[in-house]
Amino acid sequence: MFRFDPYAPAIDADPFPAYRILRDEYPCFWSEDAQMWVLSRHSDILTALNEWRTYSSAKGNLMTELPNRAGATLGTTDPPRHDRLRGLIQHAFTRRGLEGLGEPMRQIAADIADELRGCEEFDFIADFNAKYTARVLFAALGLPVGDEEVVRRNAVLMVQSDPVTRAKGPEHIAAYNWMRDYAAEIIAERRARPQNDLISHFSMAEIDGDRLDEQEVLLTTTTLIMAGVESLGGFLAMFGLNLADHPEARRSAVADPAVLADAIEESLRFNTSAQRFRRCLVEDVEIHGQTMRAGDFVCLAYGSGNRDERRFPNPDVYDIARKPRGHLGFGGGVHACLGAMIARMAVKIAMEEFHKAVPDYVRAEQNLKWMPSSTFRSPLKLMLRRC
Ligand code: HEM
């Protein structure tokens, strides 16, 4: 009997064989393990993303949701409340809002990459990625230098779930509570002394006299820290892994850094860190001979849609010349990732500088340990060796 258990360590390690069975044989599958439906084909996921009136985010979007988040944040509300929240903060994420971030990002990446020049073997995640993503997000959000390690530790814990209880454990909830208290302190400081950073900008942003209230600023800041540090770090880890495993792609990117932009899009398709999000049905939906009922949760398996041969030919091949338009690496519809532009820029700059210090490398360990998470997928450690 086929099972799909998004909490299983085997799915963290390699979800792709199960995704293929889902797409081919059970395109609308009831997972007893997750207690939700699973949609795995690209076209069905896209329809769900576009039909937000039917597939609501207001009961939470993480596969295992954190307390008090549902209905209160950008990712966990439906229009019109969602549009209002997004409208109030999105100007900070436009090209103009991000102007001026490129040079500091490059300097941060170059400094950290420099430390690797003498190393034959190192952990890409601990020795480069974690330091870089935390410092970059700190610069963008305006968080105090020195807090990077503790903030990252808590951000990573917040998105994990316990594979045995299939819920958030006390350590995950404690991390979330810690992050909210931390965000509250920062907001109070920025309100008192506004600076040129994202938190200062959106906590003061106003459209037609409308502003975010205290609770909204708090939850938006907490979400941005979590999304920023964890999603960015998770994806950069996957990108480093893809380049380590595909020497031709890596050599092209080292010879011509402009190639990195296409390689990033292909990695977002091939191996995105944001594997699965959930929605809750507002009305019954008939699909592939099944009836999903109003009130049921539905998992949108972005990682599977990205490998759907009905949309992408030879989907299991990592091909940086593919230009995979319509990939689901940043989701889609009204909830498409707000941080997509900053993420693309940060990852490209990171690898440009990393490749100056370490132009050729292979994996030093074949067996990877994966983060236990029903939503995200990335390795906990990635040992690389120069070659
Ligand atoms: C490469 C790194 C990243 C990936 C792969 C990623 C992926 C995603 C995905 C798949 C969604 C859709 C969630 C859903 O369908 O419910 C999303 C939403 C979101 N992301 Fe990202 N993200 C990344 C980086 C970032 C960064 C750096 C930030 C902020 C600094 C950010 C902020 C957000 C926010 C606020 C939303 C919710 C948008 C809304 O509901 O309107 N993300 N992200």
Image: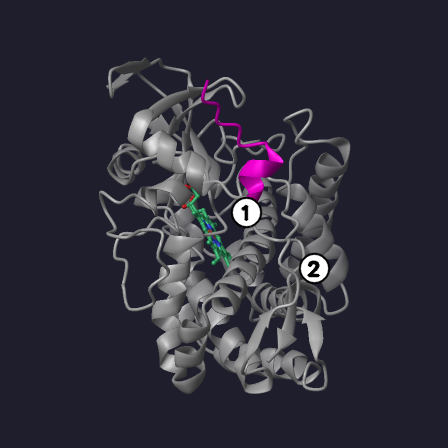
Q: Which mark, by number, is residue 189? A: 2
Q: For this rendering, which residue is in front, 37 or 159?
A: 37
- Indicate yes or no whether the magenta region holds residue 209: no
Q: Quadrant of residue 270?
A: bottom left
Q: CA distance from mark 2 to mark 1?
A: 34 Å
Horizontal arrangement in the rendering, residue 203 relative to residue 367 (left or right): left
Q: Which residue is mark 1?
A: 377
On the image, the x and y values in percent for residue 378 come to: 57, 51
Horizontal arrangement in the rendering, residue 339 relative to residue 44 (left or right): right
Element carrying mark 1: loop
* Colour pattern of the rendering: one colour
Q: Amino acid at mark 2?
A: Glu
Counting residues from the start of the chain, the first of labels 2 and 1 encountered is 2
Q: For this rendering, which residue is in front, 280 or 203?
A: 280
For the point 34% across and 46% down, which residue is it?
307
Front of the two marks 2 and 1: 1
Task: Say whether residue 29 is visible.
Answer: yes
Element carrying mark 2: helix
Few, some or many residues within 10 Å of mark 1 (<14, 14–19, 20+) = many
> Is the stretch drawn in magenta largely helix, strand or loop?
loop
For the point 63% across and 47% down, which residue is it?
370
Classify the position of the C terminus by image quarter. Answer: bottom right
The answer to whether marks 2 and 1 mark residues whose Cβ atoms lie closer than 8 Å is no
Q: Is residue 101 above or below residue 9?
A: below
Q: Which mark, by number, is residue 276? A: none
Q: For this rendering, which residue is in front, 12 or 59?
A: 12
| Residues drawn in magenta | 1-13
On the image, the x and y values in percent for residue 289 come to: 24, 15
Q: Amino acid at mark 1?
A: Arg
